[in-house]
Image (spheres, helix red, strand yellow):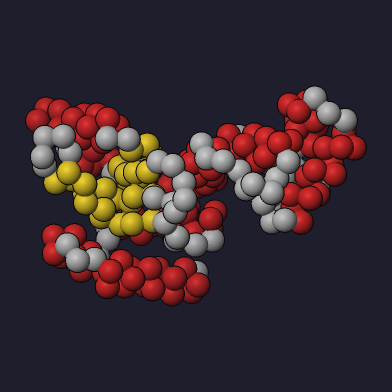
Amino acid sequence: MVQFEKKYEEWLQKNLLEEKNHRRREILEKGLGHGTVEFLRSIWFPTIGNLDHLYPEWEVRDLNNRYRYLDLAYIPNGHVGKGCIEIQGYGPHARDLDVRRFKDLCWRHSLLALDGWTLLPIAYLSIIEEPKQCQQLILAFIGKFMSSTNSPSHLSWLEAEVVRFASRILRPITPTEVSIHLKISARHTRRILHKLVESQILAVASGTER
């Protein structure tokens, strides 16, 4: 994971250098939590291959005029919407949660949702015990932002619909599924999939899946 460590340090330093807000900068200088780093190392980076469009300890102001800090904000350029990934440790979010903190957590999630954030809470135990499921979840999370926007203008409507269809699925898609979804022949489906792979819009998951 030498590549991850290098990319992680570059990414963190970039966020520090670009941050003008002294509150967020002070938090970043202390370093990210263990759960957040482990999520990036084990789940996000192996799945996506980069840390683009992710902003750690992102500051937001809720509807009650309070500052909130998100573990990771996902704000892709040119896409509609903004995502919030929260790493939930068992201790602070379950075992040790008193009534006051429980109510505050509910308010936090409600106010962020009303402000247009797509929330994705991930248990730390799932990162450790269920990494594959978490990776599928991240693909679907990113796909939500891709499918809510227009596909590249050079794509035909059939190609654009394949991209949207793939973005909504939690797993690789098969040519047969695409053929049934689009109601076109298997031969025409393969031709579309090959073109999308050649354009690096889709990737081959196996010999029969994309």
Q: Residue at x 24, y 66 (%)?
A: 19
| Residue 105 or residue 99, whichever sits in front | 105
User: Does residue 171 appear left or right of residue 69 in this picture?
Assistant: right
Quadrant of the rendered structure where residue 36 is? Answer: bottom left
Residue 73, above or below 19: above
User: Does residue 51 appear left or right of residue 143 in this picture?
Assistant: left
Quarter of the C terminus within the rendering: top right
User: Does residue 133 appear left or right of residue 59 in this picture?
Assistant: right
Tell me residue 25's x, y (percent): 19, 65
Residue 56, above or below 158: below
Tell me residue 27's x, y (percent): 18, 61
Q: Residue at x 23, y 42 (%)?
A: 91
Q: Is residue 113 visible?
A: yes
How many numbered badges does the structure rendering display? 0
| Residue 110 or residue 99, whichever sits in front | 110
Residue 174, above or below 51: above
Q: Residue at x 87, y 34 (%)?
A: 186
Tell me residue 34's x, y (percent): 30, 58
Tell me residue 207's x, y (percent): 81, 48
Residue 3, above or below 204: below
Q: Which residue sits furthest front?
A: 153
User: Does residue 4 appear left or right of residue 96 in this picture?
Assistant: right
Q: Residue at x 87, y 37 (%)?
A: 188
Q: Is residue 140 visible?
A: no
